[in-house]
Image: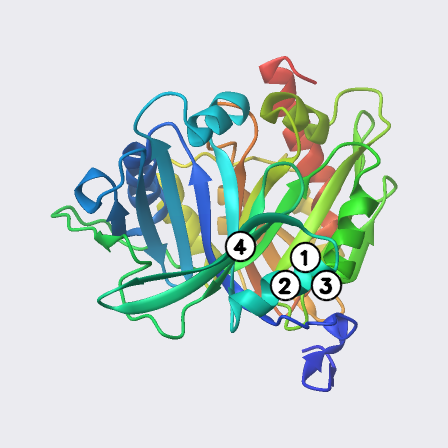
């Protein structure tokens, strides 16, 4: 484990953590069909029904379905009529992440502190209540049209938030071992990475823990640069990517073209048994990126001894990397939306605190093969 200084892992010790942020509360996606999106995440990724809001709960313009798996909550929201802000967001970006909600002790303090440090206002602190108590929520903009909602819920005992009711359904599907959000990656335009890293440092008290340049993340054809920002307890990590010069269009440029601006590229979710999780997801219909079989001929020479047998890792396409703290196993889905934008990463950490630097070249080559098939490389 990392060295601890003042109760913080050394890796995150520089973070000011003045809000403080306790963890990810929920992720909200604006999608064209919330009911169908929620159903896919239930059947293909093991999420369970949690809550619903819509016409039956007094919402006239939109409906939302909430799914949960361990500490991960995802909200799918769709408009109920034309001409709405939600609908305009979907028309421009396709299905994608609108809100990353962060759990705080004091949503008013978090909002005021962020605004004082230069954040752009999204939602002033507001108290929302029902028979189960109350929450306080507030919000600020980050890159593109993505927002952070601060959620204070110590005085609330309801199913999710006021305005939601329990989602009752007779259908059941097994969970698949997903535990929590490990990190969430944002793509921004060329030249904007440092601006947004400074935003997280100055406005939200994050620290930069890792950086990668085009020497680290490149192939013969494409490249990108990335910096990883983290809060003080290490529970919230936001890598920020921007394109770098290459012979052909990188995955970041492809994302920016089809998402029509900056946004969340992928959500990394953790598991304690990646072989079991990925097997279940694959059998349920999730498609994963594949690296060449030759990757597995030398991977153990690079990473050393691991607990897992290499055969199932190769069969599933799971990648392995090691840092000074241990090793990790990871795999990436193909895009889950019609546009080649949002995808998920499944990760299992066996001590490692890094992000799979040793896998970048093989992963990028796999992505380039998919881009070539799409005609966007």
Does 187 sit above or below residue 161?
above
Q: CA distance from mark 3 to mark 4?
A: 22 Å
Percent of width and height locating residue 128: 36, 60
Q: Disc number at residue 115?
A: 1
Q: Disc number at residue 124?
A: 4
Q: Nearer the viewer, mark 3 or mark 4?
A: 4
Choose top left, top right, bottom left or bottom right for residue 282: top left
Q: Is residue 156 left or right of residue 371?
A: left
Which circle's residue, 3 or 4, is located before the other in the chain?
A: 4
Q: Is residue 79 left or right of residue 97?
A: left
Q: Disc number at residue 112?
A: 2
Does 7 sit above or below residue 240?
below
Quarter of the figure that contains the C terminus: top right
Q: CA distance from mark 4 to mark 2?
A: 9 Å
Residue of label 3: 206
Dot 4: within a 10 Å radius of its alpha carbon, few (fewer than 14), some, or many (20 or more) residues? some
Foreground pick, 21 / 228: 21
């Amino acid at each position: 484990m990392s060295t601890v200084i003042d109760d913080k892992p050394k890796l995150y010790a520089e973070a000011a953590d003045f809000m403080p942020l306790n963890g990810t509360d929920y992720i909200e996606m604006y999608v064209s069909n919330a009911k169908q999106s929620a159903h896919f995440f239930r059947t293909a990724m093991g999420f369970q029904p949690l809550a619903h809001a819509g016409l039956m709960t007094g919402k006239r313009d939109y409906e939302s379905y909430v799914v949960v798996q361990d500490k991960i909550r995802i909200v799918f929201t769709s408009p109920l009529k034309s001409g709405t802000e939600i609908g305009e967001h979907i028309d421009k970006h396709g299905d994608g992440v609108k809100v990353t909600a962060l759990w705080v002790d004091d949503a008013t303090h978090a909002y005021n502190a962020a605004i004082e440090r230069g954040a752009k206002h999204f939602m002033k602190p507001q108290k929302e209540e029902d028979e189960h108590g109350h929450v306080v929520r507030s919000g600020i903009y980050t890159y593109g049209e993505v927002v952070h909602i601060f959620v204070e819920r110590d005085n609330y005992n309801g199913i999710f938030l006021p305005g939601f009711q329990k989602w009752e359904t007779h259908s059941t599907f097994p969970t698949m071992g997903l535990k929590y959000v490990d990190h969430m990656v944002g793509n921004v335009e060329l030249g904007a990475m440092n601006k947004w890293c400074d935003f997280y440092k100055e406005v939200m008290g994050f620290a930069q823990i890792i950086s990668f340049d085009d020497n680290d993340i490149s192939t013969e054809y494409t490249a990108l640069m990335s910096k990883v920002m983290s809060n003080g307890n290490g529970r919230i990590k936001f890598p920020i990517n921007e394109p770098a010069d290459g012979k052909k269009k990188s995955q970041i440029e492809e994302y920016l073209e089809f998402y029509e601006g900056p946004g969340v590229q992928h959500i990394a979710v953790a598991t304690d048994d990646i072989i079991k999780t990925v097997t279940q997801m694959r059998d349920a219909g999730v498609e994963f990126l594949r690296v060449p079989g030759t990757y597995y001929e030398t991977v153990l020479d690079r990473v050393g001894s691991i607990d897992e047998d290499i055969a199932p890792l190769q069969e599933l396409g799971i990648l392995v990397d090691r840092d000074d703290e241990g090793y990790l196993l990871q795999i990436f889905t193909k895009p889950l939306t019609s546009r080649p934008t949002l995808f998920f990463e499944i990760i299992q950490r066996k001590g490692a605190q890094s992000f799979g630097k040793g896998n970048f070249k093989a992963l990028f080559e796999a992505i380039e093969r998919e881009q070539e098939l799409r005609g966007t490389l």
